Image: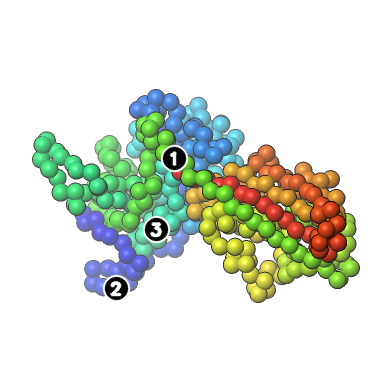
């Protein structure tokens, strides 16, 4: 069978454009390995407060192009897996081999999914962009996998191989559910899903892989330096002339009136947090993503900005380590609702409350803030990725 590259436009051999289908996509995470070469359960290694397998799970859940995720794991880890993540399509026990584990995962795929991605849970660095490339390819051509070129010199029995003709296959590997189920009926122990499809006569295609998408196999694989970034955010809003306008601060409504003037709910504290997060990831600022010229943001609750920004960072592979924010205001008394504010921010970002700090101070009656003309917010956010 031929292995062919996939571009933006896919055509049949006679030049006609076509697509295989637009059906739903499910990802199967294979997390049932024994980690024998690693010497410990590598899938339970802590990465930014979550285990390796869950980092892989979140990458697919938050990718925006996958409709469901299922996990194949060891029998003794089923309950623990369900306790950590409750919104999976399924959790099933794996087999003695990778192929048998994939077969069990395919058997558990619910009706209604047309396409499937199979991913090594030990590849936690998979990006949303790579997932999207594979999904686009399988929708257009039916079966595809990512691969990267080989840079090392490779010899076989002393013979120097032409590395320009070699590719290192990665996951996720994808195909139509029915095609992969049929191919995996082959009892042979082949290297990966694409090998089964090829053996069954299915033409497969290659998309550009990602060198970062490495599989954790040895302890040295998790010693890569972690990239840590810090972002700073500031925002200020004057009090409204409308005496009935509500006052929102930190995602919580205060009884004080009037509230702050702005296109959205004018939550200065949350706007500062959004800018800090976007700044840390070099993704612009709040005005770029939620411009006041856009009517959809009129009177919008700013917790939505926080939530969508958190999802944006996760799609880029970032983990939010912590947020530290300060309100500068003569009124209201912010700290009486500090825990409620922290809880709401943590929920919107999908992180623990202990990673969110909120403080408040006055401006000692100096300047516009000190004269109670408005409220300012400052924030620092720390994010990381490997």
* Closer to us: 374 or 103: 374
Check contact, mark 3 vs mark 1: CB within 8 A: no
| Residue 119 in view (yes/no) | yes
- At mark 1, the secondary structure is loop
- From the image, tell me which residue sits under label 3: 133
Residue 237 x/y as whole percent: 76, 64
Give the label, 1 or 2, closer to the camera.
1
Q: Earlier in the sequence, mark 3 or mark 1?
A: 3
**Where is residue 99 drawn, in percent x and y?**
34, 38
**Which residue is identified by label 1?**
225
Q: Is residue 115 above or below residue 357?
A: below
Mark sitting earlier along the chain (3/2): 2
Q: Quadrant of residue 190?
A: top left
Residue at 11%, 35% (x, y): give it.
Answer: 157
Q: Residues within 10 Å of mark 3 (few under 14, many from 20)?
A: many
Distance from label 3 to label 2 (Cα)?
21 Å
Q: Residue furthest top?
A: 39
Q: Residue at x 41, y 54 (%)?
A: 130
Tell me which residue sits at (19%, 52%) in the image. Answer: 164
How far apart marks 3 and 1 lie (CA) works out to 27 Å
Kindly identify which residue carries mark 2.
Answer: 16
Label 2 crowding class (10 Å Cα cut-off): few <14, some 14-19, many 20+?
A: few
Depth check, front residue: 266 or 190: 266
First of labels 1, 2 by sequence position: 2
Measured from the top left, where is residue 9 in percent x and y?
34, 69
The image quarter containing residue 291 is bottom right
Q: With 263 as the anchor, is 92 left or right in this view?
A: left
Q: Judge from the rendering whether residue 202 lies leftward or rightward of residue 223; answer left or right.
A: left
Image quarter hosting the N terminus: bottom left
Q: Residues within 10 Å of mark 1 (few under 14, many from 20)?
A: few
In this rendering, which labeled residue sits more in front, label 3 or label 1? 1
């Amino acid at each position: 069978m031929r292995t062919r590259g996939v571009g933006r436009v896919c055509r049949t051999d006679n030049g006609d454009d076509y697509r295989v289908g637009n059906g739903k996509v499910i990802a199967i995470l294979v997390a049932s390995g024994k980690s024998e070469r690693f010497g410990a359960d590598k899938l339970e290694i802590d990465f930014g407060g979550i285990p390796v397998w869950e980092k892989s799970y979140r990458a697919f859940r938050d990718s925006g192009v996958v409709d469901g995720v299922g996990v194949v794991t060891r029998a003794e880890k089923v309950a623990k897996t369900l306790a950590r993540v409750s919104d999976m399509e399924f959790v099933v026990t794996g087999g003695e081999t990778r192929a048998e584990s994939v077969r069990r995962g395919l058997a558990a795929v619910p009706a209604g999914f047309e396409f499937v991605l199979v991913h090594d849970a030990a590849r936690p660095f998979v990006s949303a962009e790579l997932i999207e490339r594979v999904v686009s390819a399988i929708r257009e051509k039916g079966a595809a996998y990512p691969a990267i070129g080989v840079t090392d010199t490779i010899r076989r029995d002393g013979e120097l191989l032409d590395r320009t003709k070699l590719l290192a296959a990665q996951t996720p590997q994808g195909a139509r559910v029915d095609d992969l189920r049929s191919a995996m009926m082959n009892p042979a122990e082949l290297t990966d899903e694409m090998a089964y499809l090829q053996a069954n006569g299915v033409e497969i295609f290659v998309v550009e892989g990602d060198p970062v998408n490495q599989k954790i196999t040895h302890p040295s694989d998790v010693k890569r330096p972690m990239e840590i970034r810090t972002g700073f955010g500031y925002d200020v809003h004057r009090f409204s002339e409308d005496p009935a306008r509500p006052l929102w601060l930190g995602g919580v409504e205060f009884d004080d009136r009037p509230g702050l003037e702005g296109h959205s709910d004018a939550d200065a504290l949350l706007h500062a947090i959004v800018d800090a997060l976007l700044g840390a990831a070099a993704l612009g600022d709040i005005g770029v993503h939620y411009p006041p010229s856009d009517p959809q943001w009129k009177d919008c609750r700013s917790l939505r900005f926080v939530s969508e920004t958190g999802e944006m960072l996760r799609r880029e592979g970032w983990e939010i380590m912590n947020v530290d924010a300060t309100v500068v205001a003569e009124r209201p008394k912010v700290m009486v609702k500090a825990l409620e504010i922290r809880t709401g921010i943590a929920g919107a970002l999908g992180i623990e409350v202990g990673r969110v700090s909120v403080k408040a101070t006055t401006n000692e009656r100096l300047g516009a803030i000190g004269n109670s003309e408005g409220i300012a917010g400052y924030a620092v956010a720390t994010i990381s990725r490997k």
